């Protein structure tokens, strides 16, 4: 591939930078993984809470009806949320764990 007029290869990152543009040796890759894990945890919590609130709200409406009624047990969002929460916690633990057997 031809170099640019200033002598840089347009495909590779500039000298002194890691695989993520603007970072030294990919140092923010760890921060990016932590941020992604925290977002996964937040989404898991949110979906779980929505499922529990939906279940509680529809049960309360059915219980307040003198003739009884129907309510929804939103186990889908609760299970999905708990699995997503567990995945986020696992990812967060993996990013904070020092690599075993690696010497600098």
Image (spheres, rainbow, N blue to C red):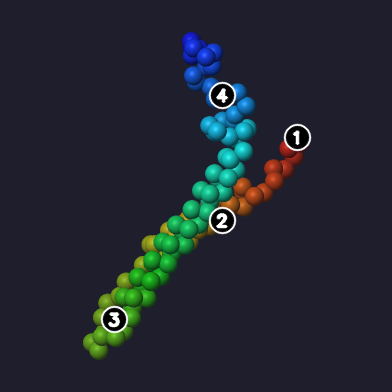
> Which mark is in front, 3 or 4?
4
Q: CA distance from mark 4 to mark 1?
A: 24 Å
Mark sitting earlier along the chain (3/4)? 4
Q: Quadrant of the C terminus?
A: top right
- Residue 14's label in the rendered image is 4
Left or right, residue 6 beside residue 51:
right
- Residue 62's label in the rendered image is 3
Q: How many marks?
A: 4
Query: How busy is the neighbourhood of tag 3: few (under 14 within 10 Å), some, or many (20 plus)?
Result: some
Query: How busy is the neighbourhood of tag 1: few (under 14 within 10 Å), some, or many (20 plus)?
Result: few
Mark sitting earlier along the chain (2/4)? 4
The residue shown at (29%, 86%) is: 64
The residue shown at (54%, 25%) is: 13
Mark sitting earlier along the chain (3/2)? 3
Q: Nearer the viewer, residue 82 or 21?
A: 21
Instruction: Give the residue pinned by disc 2.
Output: 89
Quarter occupied by residue 7: top right
Image vertical order of residue 35 relative to residue 5, above or below: below
The residue shown at (23%, 87%) is: 67
Mark 2 lies on a secondary structure that is helix
**Residue 71, position as x, y percentages in the image:** 30, 75
Image vertical order of residue 58 relative to residue 11, above or below: below
């Amino acid at each position: 591939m031809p170099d640019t007029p200033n002598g840089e290869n347009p495909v590779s990152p500039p000298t002194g930078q890691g695989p993520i543009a603007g970072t030294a040796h990919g140092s923010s890759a760890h921060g990016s993984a932590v941020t992604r894990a925290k977002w996964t945890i937040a989404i898991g919590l949110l979906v779980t809470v929505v499922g529990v609130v939906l279940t509680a709200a529809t049960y309360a409406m059915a219980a307040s009806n003198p003739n009884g009624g129907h309510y929804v047990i939103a186990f889908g969002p609760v299970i999905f949320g708990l699995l997503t929460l567990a995945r986020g916690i696992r990812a967060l633990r993996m990013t904070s764990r020092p690599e075993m057997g690696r010497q600098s």
